């Protein structure tokens, strides 16, 4: 006979091992016996390119914006019990009842139209359980981001590049429109000064909001090199305190180019891994790490004063090489017996201009090309179906086929490949 808590324990195990892109879905599934909700969104600024993880009604999650999530976070009272707040807020393009929770890592969880499901007197309290599951999910996200595996870095780079492109297009489009509107409304040739003043105020406010949104998006996918390096120092502080190893930091230029988030994450993970590998050697007393930025690459140098026995082929080092290769970087290890090891890493700041196949070489059918064009233009499945007068299931069928033909593993990668080949 199955124990009544078996399903919960299995859901906890699934959540604890969930890939980043599935974590919202796994969290909603684990909580579903205890909470009803129309949508669940996780918002964490440490996840570059994809700070939102979503599960639930497409009509809601497709319209959730960073501005809405920022406003909800600001609403949470500092003294709220376990960082939890319930009430009405703008979410998914409308005013909805929501439940919002924070975590020690500053991640945010939002459920729309939440309703606890009554259970037996001996069952877990729904509020306690949701808080427990959320903290587990938030910690899973923090660990995955800090570890920065190659798959995460490649996904983040593709998503970051695509979101910056879309944001830039929106800013250009709406800025031109609003600036034209402002010029017309400020013209002395127009009558009704009161109407002109009111319209000018509305347009000016819209412009400020748009620019703020653009800056906010940039903040999520870029990190100043100096603050990225400072976070590295904080990461290594426990090692410096308890190991007796002198870890020295050579500061990068303060005015260096901002780092894409995935490069900042990879750089910190690389240095942490290298320092740990170096201090595992006998006789290491000092490790020096230095970052520099030449405008095109982040240049990392880590050196120890050990016996020079660091092996570039060791399993721990092999994983670091995979991280570097995921960002099209390079790593060189110079071992000097009796004098130590010197590791130099170069990480390009921009995605590589990879030579891709021409669209004709993909052998796409006419309908598949139409679907890909609409996908590249930012349309979701429902919009593609409406424009082509086909069902959403047919859209999904075409997407699966074209993903296979063009070698894409995700929607974001398919969009990036389409843009690289001139499809808009």
Image: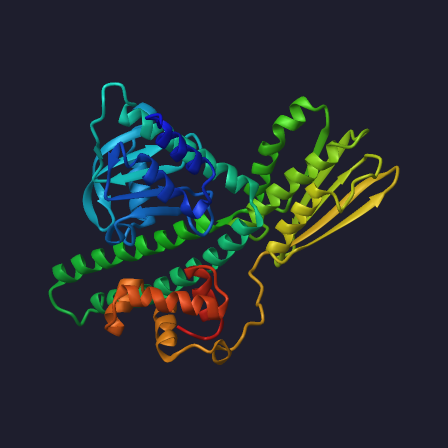
Tell which of 142 and 346 is nearer to you: 142
Residue 176 image point, x, y percent: 32, 67
The residue at the point 39 percent across, 62 percent down is 166
Residue furthest to the right in view is: 338
292 relative to 60 in the view: left or right = right
Quadrant placement of the N terminus: top left
- Whole-percent x, y for residue 287 in the image: 74, 35
Horizontal and vertical percent position of residue 197: 18, 58
Nearest the viewer among 247 and 177 is 247
Q: Nearer the viewer, residue 112 or 272?
A: 112
Q: Residue at x 33, y 40 (%)?
A: 29
From the viewer's perspective, is 366 left or right of 249? left
Q: Is residue 378 visible?
A: no
Q: Residue furthest front?
A: 1
Q: Quadrant of residue 317?
A: top right
Q: Quadrant of the C terminus?
A: bottom left
- Tell me if I can see residue 323 in this picture: yes
Residue 119 is situated, as x and y percent measured from the top left of the image, at 22, 26
Residue at 71% from the left image edge and 37% from the top image edge: 277
- Scheme of colours in the image: rainbow
- x 69%, y 41%: residue: 316
Q: Is residue 321 left or right of residue 356?
A: right
Q: How many badges with numbers are in the image?
A: 0
């Amino acid at each position: 006979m199955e124990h009544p808590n078996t399903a919960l324990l299995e859901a906890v195990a699934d959540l604890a091992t969930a890939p980043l892109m599935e974590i919202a879905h796994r969290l909603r599934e684990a909580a579903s016996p205890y909470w009803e909700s129309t949508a669940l969104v996780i918002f964490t600024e440490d996840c570059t390119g994809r700070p939102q993880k979503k599960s639930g009604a497409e009509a809601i999650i497709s319209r959730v914006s960073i501005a809405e999530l920022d406003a909800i976070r600001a609403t949470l009272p500092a003294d709220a019990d376990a960082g939890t707040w319930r009430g009405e807020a703008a979410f998914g393009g409308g005013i909805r009842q929501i439940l919002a929770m924070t975590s020690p890592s500053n991640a945010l969880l939002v459920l729309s139209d939440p309703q606890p499901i009554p259970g037996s007197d001996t069952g877990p309290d729904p509020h306690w359980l949701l808080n427990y599951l959320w903290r587990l999910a938030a910690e899973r996200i923090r660990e995955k981001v800090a570890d920065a595996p190659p798959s995460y870095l490649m996904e983040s780079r593709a998503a970051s590049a695509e979101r910056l492109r879309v944001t830039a297009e929106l800013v250009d489009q709406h800025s031109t429109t609003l600036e034209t509107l402002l010029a017309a409304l400020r013209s002395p040739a127009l009558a009704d000064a009161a109407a002109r003043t009111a319209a000018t105020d509305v347009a000016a406010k819209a412009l400020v909001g748009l620019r703020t949104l653009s800056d906010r998006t940039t903040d999520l996918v870029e990190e100043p090199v100096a603050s990225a390096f400072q976070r590295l120092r904080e990461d290594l502080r426990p090692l410096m305190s308890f190991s007796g190893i002198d870890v020295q930091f050579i500061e990068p230029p303060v005015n260096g180019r901002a780092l894409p988030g995935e490069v900042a994450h990879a750089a910190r993970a690389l240095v942490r891994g290298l320092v740990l590998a170096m201090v595992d050697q006998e006789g290491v007393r000092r490790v020096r790490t230095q970052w520099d930025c030449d405008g095109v690459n982040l240049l990392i140098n880590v050196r120890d004063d050990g016996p020079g026995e660091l092996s570039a082929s060791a399993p721990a080092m092999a994983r670091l090489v995979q991280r570097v290769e995921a960002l099209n970087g390079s790593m060189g290890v110079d071992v000097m017996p009796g004098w130590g090891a010197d590791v130099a890493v170069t990480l390009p700041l921009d995605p590589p201009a990879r030579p891709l196949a021409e669209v004709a070489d993909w052998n796409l059918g006419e309908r598949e090309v139409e679907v890909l064009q609409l996908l590249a233009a930012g349309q979701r499945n429902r919009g593609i179906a409406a424009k082509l007068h086909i069902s959403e299931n047919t859209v999904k069928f075409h997407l699966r086929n074209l993903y296979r033909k063009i070698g894409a593993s995700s929607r974001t990668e398919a969009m990036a490949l389409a843009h690289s080949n001139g499809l808009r």
